[in-house]
Image: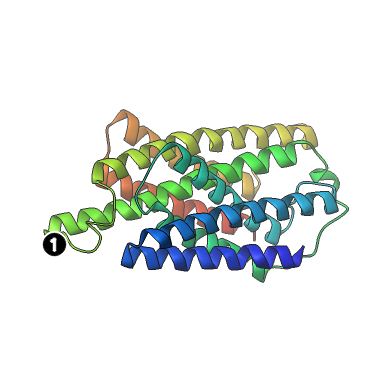
């Protein structure tokens, strides 16, 4: 399985480099190569996760390596599912580096498997809660990438240069729509993750909420995105302010995940 993980990692690195080359030279054959590589990496990554599940006998999200690898898988398939429905020019150029960074972080962690889980983890709610939560972060990562693309495009338009980014990035309207769709997918999944986490806690402790650090930080992250959703869809905060909000929200979400894992 280690060889399969290494193959998947190197394929993601290849995809990232290929997408960046395409971003500069705009050769369609290079883009086709990058897209094919992304599908190959996604398939290899999914196979690696399934094989690890079969070997361990439980959902492989109980170690740092497994959790980060699963997060990368979530971003990958969130991107592929989004791209299947919507065409966003050069989106893969910005998404693939995030996936590769996550895979590199996973590669640095121990790949040893935990066979015997602690009693608290021996629950059907483990795969449901963790899987839903990580898929939520997958779509929120897409919103983060869209926010960066929006600010780059807006900067060129406001500076009236109409140069490198202007011809390679989607319109501001398309990027604002991308932001909206990713939030509309990610936030309900995050909410479902909170609910399933509460049910898992109820099963193990008899109470829905314990106010431990992980629960508290998860609630803080949810409240931040709830505020973003409110400002975006109720008060009409769009375009540049919406882009900045999703970038800041994702950075805070990553910080809370890091602090929760300490």
In the orientation shown, which residue stands out farthest toward the left?
160
Q: Nearer the viewer, residue 165 or 69?
A: 165
Q: Nearer the viewer, residue 186 or 33?
A: 33
Secondary element at tag 1:
loop
Number of numbered discs on residues: 1
Name which quarter of the figure residue 201 lies in. Answer: top right
On the rendered image, what quadrant is the C terminus found in?
bottom right
Residue 38 in the image: above or below residue 223? below
How busy is the neighbourhood of tag 1: few (under 14 within 10 Å), some, or many (20 plus)? few
Task: Examine the rendering and report whether any part of residue 235 can be seen.
Answer: yes
Residue 193 in the image: above or below residue 98? above
How far across and how far down the image is residue 118, in percent?
84, 50
Q: Is residue 181 left or right of residue 107?
A: left
How far across and how far down the image is residue 211, in percent?
64, 42
Residue shown at 84% from the left, 52% from the top: 56
In the orientation shown, which residue stands out farthest toward the bottom?
108
Mark 1 highlights which residue? 161
């Amino acid at each position: 399985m280690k060889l399969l993980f290494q193959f998947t990692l190197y394929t993601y690195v290849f995809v990232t480099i290929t997408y960046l080359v395409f971003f500069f030279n705009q050769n369609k054959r290079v883009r086709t190569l990058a897209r094919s590589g992304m599908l190959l990496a996604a398939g290899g990554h999914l196979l690696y996760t399934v094989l690890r599940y079969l070997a361990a006998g439980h959902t492989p999200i109980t170690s740092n390596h497994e959790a980060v690898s699963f997060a990368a898988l979530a971003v990958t398939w969130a991107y592929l599912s989004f791209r299947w429905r919507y065409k966003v020019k050069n989106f893969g150029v910005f998404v693939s580096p995030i996936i590769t960074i996550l895979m590199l972080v996973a590669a640095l962690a121990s790949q040893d498997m935990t066979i015997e889980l602690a009693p608290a983890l021996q629950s059907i709610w483990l795969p449901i809660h963790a899987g839903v939560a990580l898929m939520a972060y997958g779509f929120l990562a897409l919103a983060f990438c869209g926010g960066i693309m929006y600010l780059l495009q807006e900067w060129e338009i406001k500076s009236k240069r109409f140069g490198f980014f202007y011809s390679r990035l989607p319109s501001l309207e398309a990027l604002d729509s991308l932001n909206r769709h990713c939030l509309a997918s990610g936030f309900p999944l995050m909410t479902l993750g909170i609910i399933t986490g509460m049910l898992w806690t109820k099963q193990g402790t008899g109470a829905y909420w314990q106010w431990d650090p992980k629960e508290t930080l998860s609630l803080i992250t949810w409240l931040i995105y709830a505020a973003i959703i409110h400002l975006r869809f109720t008060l009409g905060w769009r375009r540049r302010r919406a882009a900045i909000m999703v970038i800041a929200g994702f950075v805070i979400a990553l910080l809370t995940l890091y602090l929760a894992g300490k």
